[in-house]
Image: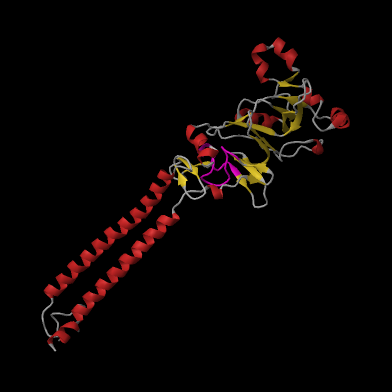
């Protein structure tokens, strides 16, 4: 009877319940830690899309975070309808093509710029700009045509004659004798004749900075960008003008990326850690810092994650059990022996 009464002591039952709750809490924490470690994984090669619509997406670009080079992170956006856009400080612009060869560049379309279909209708526009902190730059193959500029604020002169008379001010003039003004791309002679017969004026000027372009648009009705597309034909017919903006980019070449892409070493995809932005080789089953076929590194990382999870759970379990036993002994040492009779001295609450 003495043992039975002691086992039913409220203080002992309360201590046992607290101990059981502590054990359950430790198990839940260990499960949560394992789940968290399984969820925190960088991007893998299987989630790096290689195209958006008809535009191929190769290194150094990526439309999924962690893919490509961190220098071009968050610059390209692929819409749900499959249209690729370049994000810049002045807005988002549709991407027509991306060339990754010996002359890497992006061709953009600016819907706000003037085109032949607009005629004399000059819609409000916005100055195109690029983030100078990126590895993107406006191509020198772009020409800019400005329409109906104020002659009181803009120097509109035939450039050869003006530069001969004022060589120190040559770069600040807008060339009214530009070849492109006399041969507007895709417009034809009839469209040019209509513009020549109207009050529309045209001059060519290459702004050296975004502020220069913004200032020109302050005194001009509209503008457009024309780039020279290489046709591959023999000179002088190897280039033709087309509307659009050409943006040049650099392809960062690193030993780590070349080794990662090497098909004999697994043919991985170059990427980066989304937190530290350190290089990662994205493989089908795991991400490594070397190359996909480096089994020692891959296996070491996997074992490390598992061992780390087990160690964390073990340490937490030992600590929790020890704390529970210490608390149970402390309570039992202070509990008066009353043979199961509750009094004001042994009441917990």
Magenta region's main secondary structure?
Answer: loop
Residue 233 at what x, y percent from top left?
77, 25
Residue 273 at what x, y percent from top left?
46, 44
Q: Is residue 31 above or below residue 339?
A: above
86 displayed left or right of 193: left
292 displayed left or right of 334: right
Image quarter for residue 5? bottom left
**Who is closer to the viewer here, 149 or 72?**
72
Q: Is residue 264 above or below residue 349?
A: above
Q: Which residues are magenta?
A: 58-76
227 displayed left or right of 298: right
Q: Is residue 204 above or below residue 99?
A: above
**Who is closer to the viewer here, 300 or 246?**
300
Residue 69 drawn in magenta: yes
Residue 282 at what x, y percent from top left?
50, 45
**Who is closer to the viewer here, 303 or 53?**
303
Residue at the image point whose x is 24% and y is 62% from the top: 318
Q: How many marks?
A: 0
Can you name the residue that lies furthest to the bottom here?
Answer: 1
Residue 50 at what x, y percent from top left?
61, 45
| Visible residue check, residue 342 | no
**Who is closer to the viewer here, 276 or 208?**
276
Scheme by which the image is coloured: secondary structure
Residue at the image point whose x is 37% and y is 63% from the top: 31
Image quarter for residue 232? top right
Can you name the residue that lies furthest to the top here?
Answer: 165
Q: Quadrant of the C terminus?
A: bottom left
Q: Quadrant of the N terminus?
A: bottom left
Residue at the image point whose x is 13% and y is 80% from the top: 345
| Visible residue check, residue 290 | yes
């Amino acid at each position: 009877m003495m043992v039975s009464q002691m086992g039913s002591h409220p203080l002992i039952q309360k201590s046992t319940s607290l101990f059981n709750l502590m054990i359950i809490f430790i198990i839940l924490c260990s499960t949560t830690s394992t789940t968290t470690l399984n969820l925190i994984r960088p991007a893998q090669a299987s989630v790096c899309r290689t195209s958006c619509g008809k535009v191929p997406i190769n290194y150094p670009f990526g439309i999924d975070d962690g893919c490509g080079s961190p220098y071009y992170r968050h610059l390209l956006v692929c819409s749900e309808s499959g249209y690729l856009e370049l994000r810049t400080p002045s807005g988002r612009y549709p991407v027509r093509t991306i060339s990754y060869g010996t002359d890497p560049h992006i061709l953009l379309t600016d819907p706000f710029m003037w085109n032949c279909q607009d005629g004399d209708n000059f819609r409000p526009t916005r100055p195109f700009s690029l983030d100078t902190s990126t590895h993107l730059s406006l191509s020198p193959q772009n020409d800019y045509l400005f329409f109906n500029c104020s002659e009181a604020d803009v120097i509109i002169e035939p450039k050869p004659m003006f530069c001969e008379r004022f060589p120190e001010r040559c770069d600040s003039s807008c060339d009214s004798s530009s070849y492109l003004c006399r041969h507007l791309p895709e417009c034809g002679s009839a469209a040019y004749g209509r513009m020549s017969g109207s009050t529309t004026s045209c001059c060519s000027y290459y702004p050296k900075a975004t502020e220069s372009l913004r200032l020109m648009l302050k005194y001009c009705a509209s503008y457009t960008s024309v780039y020279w597309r290489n046709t591959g034909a023999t000179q002088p017919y190897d280039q033709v003008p087309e509307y659009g903006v050409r943006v040049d980019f650099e392809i960062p070449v690193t030993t780590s990326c070349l080794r990662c892409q090497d098909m004999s070493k697994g043919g991985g995809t170059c990427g980066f850690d989304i937190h530290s932005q350190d290089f990662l080789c994205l493989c089908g089953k795991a991400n490594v810092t070397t190359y996909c076929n480096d089994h020692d590194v891959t296996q070491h990382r996997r074992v490390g994650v598992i061992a780390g999870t087990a160690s964390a759970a073990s340490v937490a379990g030992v600590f929790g059990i020890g704390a529970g036993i210490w608390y149970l002994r402390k309570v039992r040492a202070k509990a008066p022996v009353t043979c199961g009779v509750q009094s004001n001295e042994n009441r917990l609450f």
